[in-house]
């Protein structure tokens, strides 16, 4: 299957529509030339409405972390943006619900086959980290903080674990100032080199 056909099939997916409060609207960006993969959780309500990945406050912060402008971020030949769940999953007690598991089980392996040039995976949040890190490392379940603190370990397989850039994570960022001083400069350096 070509990457064009895969993208067409993903955008037409209705696999878990009955579980989605706003219906199915898969939001992905991919191209086989991309060298960086942004692997997030699932689109929020605003992204669901716009159909554009990270078209919200989280995206503003993420672009700042990466040191890229909007045009670069939305250039599919440079950055693939493929969340673990393609559609808005709804809201729970403390924010958005987890990504629907059907997405990764159905699509992720095929997507990765169509992205042969990826050199850096930005695994944002625990679900992306579980999929992209535990395939390479037989480690006990770790907290997101522990994974992000050990970021250098995972770079050996081209994965950089990150917290979610959501404003809901402001407290985490304040409690973990090492992230800004140690991780972000290396993230920007690697992104600039690959772009």
Image (cartoon, rainbow, N blue to C red):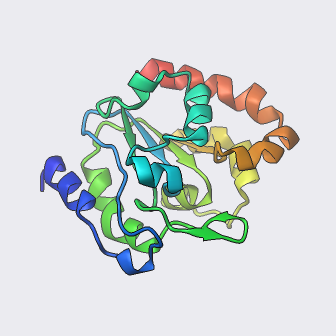
Q: Residue at x 83, y 46 (%)?
A: 171
Query: x, y (%) of residue 78?
Result: 35, 29
Q: Is residue 177 left or right of residue 102?
A: right
The residue positioned 35% from the left and 67% from the top of the image is 24
Q: Quadrant of the N terminus?
A: bottom left
Q: Is residue 60 above or below residue 165?
A: above
The extreme bottom residue here reads 18
Q: Residue at x 49, y 44 (%)?
A: 157
Would you place residue 122 above or below residue 142 in this image? above
The image position of residue 101, as x and y in percent, is 46, 72
Q: Foreground: 13 or 139?
A: 13
Q: Quadrant of residue 59?
A: top right
Residue under the image location 49 percent in, 19 percent down = 192
Residue 76 placement, left or right of 165 = left
Residue 96: name its quadrant: bottom right
The percent coordinates of residue 47 (x first, y second) are 47, 49
Asked if 185 appears above or below 27 in the picture, the reply is: above
Say which quarter of the image contains residue 81: top left
Residue 12 shows in the view: yes
Residue 136 visible in rendering: no
Q: Position of residue 20 (x, y in %)?
A: 44, 73
**Number of numbered callouts drawn:** 0
Decide: is 58 above or below 141.
above
Query: Dividing the image into 4 quarters, which one contains the C terminus?
Result: top left
């Amino acid at each position: 299957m070509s990457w064009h056909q895969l993208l067409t099939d993903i955008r037409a997916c209705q696999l878990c529509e009955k579980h989605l409060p706003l219906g199915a609207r898969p939001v992905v960006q991919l191209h086989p030339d991309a060298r960086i993969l942004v692997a997030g959780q699932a689109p929020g309500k605003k992204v669901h409405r716009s159909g554009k990945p990270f078209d919200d406050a989280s995206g503003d912060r993420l672009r700042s972390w990466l040191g890229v402008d909007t045009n670069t971020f939305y250039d599919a030949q440079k950055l693939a943006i493929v969340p673990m769940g393609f559609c808005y999953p709804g809201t729970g007690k403390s924010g958005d619900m987890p990504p629907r598991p059907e997405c990764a089980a159905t699509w992720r392996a095929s997507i990765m086959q169509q992205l042969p040039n990826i050199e850096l995976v930005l695994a944002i949040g625990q679900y992306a980290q579980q999929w992209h890190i535990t395939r390479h490392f037989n480690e006990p379940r770790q907290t997101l903080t522990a994974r992000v603190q050990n970021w250098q370990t995972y770079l050996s397989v081209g994965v950089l674990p990150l917290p979610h850039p959501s404003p809901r994570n402001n407290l985490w960022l304040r409690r973990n100032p090492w992230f800004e001083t140690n991780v972000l400069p290396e993230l920007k350096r690697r992104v600039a080199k690959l772009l």
